[in-house]
Image (tube, rainbow, N blue to C red):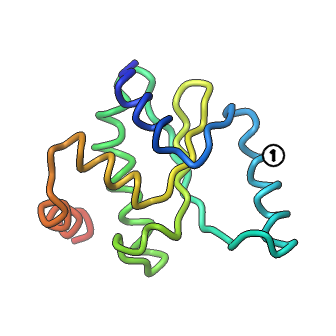
Amino acid sequence: MDSDLKDTLAAKAMAVVPGCAYNDYRRKAAERVAEGHAEESIYFESVLSVEAPARALAEQVIPSFMRYLQAKKISFDGAHSVVVALFLGAECYLLRGEVVIDVFCALEGLARDTFRGRVTGWLS
């Protein structure tokens, strides 16, 4: 497993929960929204391969996430309104969408302008 990516995700995550507790996390988050203690978030869920999580992030998760944002009519600059749940092994890392994009850009050595070009390619 790519421990650097796992460490990065853990350091940047809003929360790290056992994968089996993810539904409980979502239920509690919905309760906080209903009580007026939090804003409602949109969730995007994906699984990272244990054998090659960085490759899965680059080849599967990020392109799918960009198509998801497009379908929701959210620009990738507005990805902060989305919580990305990344399941890796037994853990679930919950990150804001913009943080996931930042992690991807750092892994790939991409500037935001270059990333924007890739997004255009994925969405065309």
Relative placement, left or right, of 123 versus 100 is left
Residue at 26% x, 69% y is 123
For the N terminus, the quadrant is top left
Q: Is residue 115 above or below residue 54?
A: below
Q: For numbered disc 1, what is the local secondary structure?
A: helix
Relative placement, left or right, of 28 versus 67 is right
Q: Amino acid at mark 1?
A: Asp
Q: Is residue 78 above or below residue 13?
A: below
Relative placement, left or right, of 66 versus 19 is left
Camera-side residue of 61 and 31: 31
For the C terminus, the quadrant is bottom left
Q: Which residue is mark 1?
A: 24
- Quarter of the image where one finds residue 54: top left
- Quarter of the image where one finds residue 55: top left
Residue 34 coordinates in the image, percent (x, y): 85, 72
Instruction: Classify 10 Å Cα crowding around label 1: few (below 14), some (14-19), many (20 and above).
Output: few
Residue 40 coordinates in the image, percent (x, y): 68, 72
Residue at 40% x, 51% y is 100
Q: Is residue 19 above or below residue 90?
A: below
Relative placement, left or right, of 45 versus 33 is left
